Image (cartoon, rainbow, N blue to C red):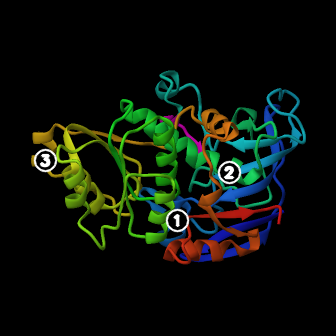
């Protein structure tokens, strides 16, 4: 089969490698249909690492995918040959303290698709995964939308963790794919006024079309001043979705006392900081999101219901052999890109 390998910083190479084979009775062989390029994939491409996770070349990244079942192990009952499925990219051990507490996303022995020293990714034609990681879509939508279930599940989980009340006034700082998934999930949970910021005007315009109450580019305007002019008491909850220190600083300024900061973005630097004075005086609560937990099926159900429309987020499509073009475009934020989809069916 063909697979796209990272071979050095900002370098990729399409190679032929053996197809994976079923080894366990509960394994499923999948033909990949669509792969969404995640910001974390771009981190590996551009810097070769995310914190302690360092790429050893050559390596295949990619974890947002939907696929078609090609073959199943003898004990598989969850899916059948020919079905289209969404892949949960996190494989938990189900035996550690975290798993037993219902926190499989922080499993002590987790193996995650497309993560260095854990598991090769899905930017290839076939993968083998356990049946429990296959979620049938029952033909409710296409494979591209299926690949979007992974980031949408993070948006759903982030909003669940925030647990804000109906009508709460919130901000979303950063409108990449994850920021938009948080936005769609927050609207579905009936947030009140929604304030959105980003440094890319085309993304702000896309947010405006979703009916948010404010859009602001922090490069061009004082977003703290403008938001507080509209909300002088401050906001109930802020979702930081861009991994920027400046956004964290802005969050502390626009939150009300007793407000909540939900950090979803992955910073490029190893250390982030907070104003101890504002943290203490406002008694801010902070939650840092680790991927998602038990939200893949809710993401599938939400897309299937028609309550969210993801079509506008997929702005660019590429073939597998064009993957490096997709990564370059995302790295440089060119051409109004929001989400790049590698369509393996093209």
Q: Give the range drawn in magenta.
A: 105-112
- List the residue tagged with mark 1: 44
Q: Distance between the residues labelled 2 and 1?
A: 20 Å
Residue 280: image quadrant is top left
Residue 47 appears in view? yes
- Horizontal side of 341 relative to 204 (left or right) equals right
Between marks 1 and 3 in the image, the one whose residue lies nearer the viewer: 3
- Mark 3 or mark 2: name the one nearer the start of the chain: 2
- Horizontal side of 208 relative to 262 (left or right) equals right
Q: Which image quadrant: the C terminus?
A: bottom right
Magenta highlight on residue 114? no
At 83% from the left edge and 60% from the top edge, which residue is drawn? 18
Is disc 2 surrounded by few (<14), some (14 to 19) or many (20+) residues within 10 Å? many
Foreground: 308 or 270? 308
At 21% from the left edge and 45% from the top edge, which residue is drawn? 234
Outermost residue toward the top in this view: 100
Position of residue 98 measured from the top left corner of the image (x, y, whole percent): 47, 28
Foreground: 17 or 169? 169
Rendered image: mark on residue 278? 3
Foreground: 310 or 150? 310
- Mark 2 or mark 1: name the one nearer the start of the chain: 1
Position of residue 169 measured from the top left corner of the image (x, y, whole percent): 32, 41
- List the residue tagged with mark 2: 147
Image: 226 above or below 301: below
Position of residue 158 measured from the top left corner of the image (x, y, whole percent): 44, 40
> The residue tagged with tag 2: helix, strand or loop?
helix
At 80% from the left edge and 36% from the top edge, which residue is drawn? 138
Q: Distance between the residues labelled 1 and 3?
A: 34 Å
């Amino acid at each position: 089969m063909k697979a796209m390998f990272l071979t050095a910083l900002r370098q990729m190479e399409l190679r032929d490698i053996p197809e994976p084979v079923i080894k366990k009775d509960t394994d499923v062989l999948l033909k990949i249909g669509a792969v969404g390029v995640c910001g974390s994939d771009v981190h590996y491409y551009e810097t070769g690492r995310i914190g302690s996770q360092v790429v050893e070349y050559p390596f295949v990244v990619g974890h947002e995918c939907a696929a078609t079942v090609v073959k199943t192990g003898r004990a598989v009952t969850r899916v059948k040959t020919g079905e289209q499925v969404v892949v949960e990219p996190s494989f938990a051990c189900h035996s550690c303290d975290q798993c037993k507490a219902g926190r499989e996303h922080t499993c002590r022995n987790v193996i995650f698709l497309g993560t260095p020293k854990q598991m090769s990714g899905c930017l290839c034609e076939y993968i083998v995964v356990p049946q429990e990681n296959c979620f049938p879509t029952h033909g409710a939508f296409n494979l591209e939308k299926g690949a979007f279930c992974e980031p949408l599940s993070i948006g759903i989980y982030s909003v669940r963790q925030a647990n804000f009340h109906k009508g709460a006034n919130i901000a979303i700082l950063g409108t990449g794919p994850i920021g938009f998934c948080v936005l769609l999930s927050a609207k579905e949970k009936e947030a009140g006024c929604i304030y959105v910021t980003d440094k890319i005007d085309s993304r702000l315009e896309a947010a405006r079309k979703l009916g948010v109450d404010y859009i602001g580019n922090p490069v061009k305007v004082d977003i703290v001043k403008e938001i507080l002019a509209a909300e002088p008491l401050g906001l109930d909850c802020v979702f930081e979705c861009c991994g920027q220190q400046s956004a964290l600083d802005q969050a502390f300024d626009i939150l009300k006392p007793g407000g909540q900061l939900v950090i979803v973005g992955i910073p490029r630097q190893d250390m982030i900081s907070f104003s101890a004075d504002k943290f203490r005086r406002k008694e801010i609560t902070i939650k840092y999101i680790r991927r998602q937990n038990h939200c893949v099926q809710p993401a599938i159900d939400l897309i299937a219901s028609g309550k969210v429309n993801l079509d506008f987020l997929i702005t660019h499509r590429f073939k597998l052999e064009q993957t490096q073009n997709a990564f370059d475009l995302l790295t440089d934020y060119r051409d109004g890109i929001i989400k790049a989809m590698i369509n393996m069916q093209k």
